[in-house]
Amino acid sequence: MKKLLTILLFIPALASANPVDDAAKKIESKVVEWRHHLHQYPELSNREFKTAAYIEKHLRSLGLQVQTGVAITGVVAILDSGKPGPVVALRADMDGLPVPEQVDLPWKSTQRSEFNGKEVPVMHACGHDTHVAMLMGAAEILVGMKDKLKGKVKFIFQPAEEGAPAGERGGAEVMVEEGVLKNPDVDAIFGLHISSATDVGKVRYREGGVMAAVDPFKIVIKGKQAHGAYPWLSIDPITTAAQVIMSVQTIVSRELSLIDDAAVITFGSIHGGVRSNIIPNEVELVGTIRTLNEEARNHIYEALPRKVKGIADSMRAQAEVTLPLDYNYPITFNDHDLMAKMLPTLINTAGQENVLYSKPVTGAEDFSFFQKEVPGVYLWIGGKPLNVDPQDAPAHHTPEFYVDDEGMKLGVRLLTNMTLDYMNK
C-alpha cells in the first residue's frame, strides 16, 4: 500500500512538468547572449540594418520562411504547422534611441550614428533589445514544439517604433500598409513591453485602452503688427495665444468625463516675436493630445478648433489649426474578448500573485496600428531587479535606463504560451 501511494504521488509530479518552461530554461543563456549583443550594437529608427541581419540569420537557422526589407528594415518570418488553424502574430520592435548610455555594463553601447543631420550617441534606452531577444527565443521554442501547433505563427520584427527620422515614414503603420497582417491573414496579435519600474517576474495587463492615442497639433494665430508702446494699433497674437492656451485646458477639465478615462492636452512649443517693443504679426503654438477612448478623442478633435476660432474671433485675430500635424497614433487598445481569453494563460504562466491589473498610461505605442486591424493584446512585463526600490528605478528614454536579463524569462514563456493556448483553446 505504501509503495502504491508513492507511485500515485509520483505520477502527478511527472505530469506537472511544463515543456515550455523546460524549453525556456534550455535557451535562457542564448536569449541573454542575444540581448547583450543587440544592446551593445543598437541602431536608430529605419537604420536597423545590422539588427535585421542578426535576426534574419537566427530565423533562417530555424528553417522558417523569412521576408526582409519590410517597411525598410523589418523582418517577418512564418512558422507553418501544416495543420489547419488560426494565424497568430507576435511582434517585437527593434530600434534604439539617440541617448548616451551612462550605465556601466560590459555590454554597454558606445555606438554613434546620425539623427536628423547631427551625430548622436545611440542606446537601447527603452528595452527593445530585450523585446527582440525574447521573440527570437519564443520562435526557437515554437519551432521545437511544431507538433503542438495548429495553424501558423507570424513573427514580426518591427523597425522605427520610436518614430521615423524627419522626412521619412516607418514603423507599424507602414508595415500594415505593406501587408504584414495579410497572406496569411492574422487572426490575433500579441506584443509586450519590458518595464524598468515593474518587478522581475510580474506582468501587468488591462482590457480596453492601455496606452493613449497621440495627436500632435499646430495653431497659427495671425494678428496685426504694431509698436509695443501703442498696443491699440495692433491685433495682438500673443495675448490671443495666452487666452487660447488657458481656454483649451477647459476642454479636458470641463467637457470630458474624466471618471471614464484620462485625457491630456499639452502645449510644448510657442514661438512669436523678435524683440521686447514689437507686437508681432503671428504666433505659432505646437502641442500634443493624448486620449484613451475614441469618444474623448473625437470630442477634442471637434472642440479644439471651436475654442481656438472663438477666442481668435473675439480678439479680431485669425487662427489656423492643423490637427493632426504630421503623424498620429491610434489608441493601443486591448480587445476585451481576447484579453479575457488570455488572462488564464497569464495566470498559469506567471502565477496569480504576479499578474497585476494595470492603470493605463498616456504614453503611446504604434502597436496600436496592428490592433486597429486585428484583435490584439499588449502587456507590460517586469524588468526591475527585486532589490531596487521602485522610486529609484531609472525611467525609460534616459541615459540611466536599465532592465535585468531575468525579466526576459517570463516574456519568452508568455509569448510562447499565448500562442499555444490561442491555437489550441
Image (cartoon, grey):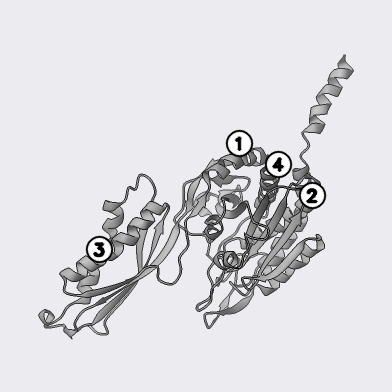
Query: Nearer the N terminus, badge 2 or badge 3?
Result: 2
CA distance for labels 2 and 3: 58 Å
Of the two numbered discs 2 and 4 on the same chain, state the one appearing first in sequence.
2
| Residue plotted at (60% across, 50% down) | 381
Can you say which quadrant of the picture contains the C terminus?
top right
Residue type, label 1: Gln
Q: Find residue 289 and name its label.
A: none
x, y percentage for residue 418? 66, 46
> Closer to us: mark 2 or mark 1?
2
Say if 288 sits above or below 15 in the image.
below
Which numbered dot is residue 352? Answer: 1
- Nearest the camera: 258 or 96? 258
N-term mark: 4 or 1? 1
- Please name the amino acid that badge 3 sits on: Lys
**Mark 3 neighbour density, 10 Å: few (under 14) some (14–19) many (20 or more):** some
Q: Residues within 10 Å of mark 1 (few under 14, many from 20)?
A: few
* Residue 20 picture quarter: top right
| Residue at numbered disc 4 | 424
Mark 2 and mark 4: Cα distance apart in space: 12 Å
Do the residues under discs 4 and 1 have CB atoms within 8 angstroms?
Answer: no
Q: Nearer the viewer, residue 10 or 314?
A: 314
* Residue type, numbered disc 4: Asn
SS type, badge 3? helix
Mark before the other along the chain sequence, 1 or 3:
3
**Residue closest to the far top:** 1
Q: Few, some or many C-alpha atoms within 10 Å of disc 2 (few <14, some 14-19, many ≥20)?
A: some
Mark 1 vs mark 3, CA separation in Å: 48 Å
> Closer to us: mark 4 or mark 1?
4
Residue 307's disc is 3
Q: Which mark is residue 146?
A: 2
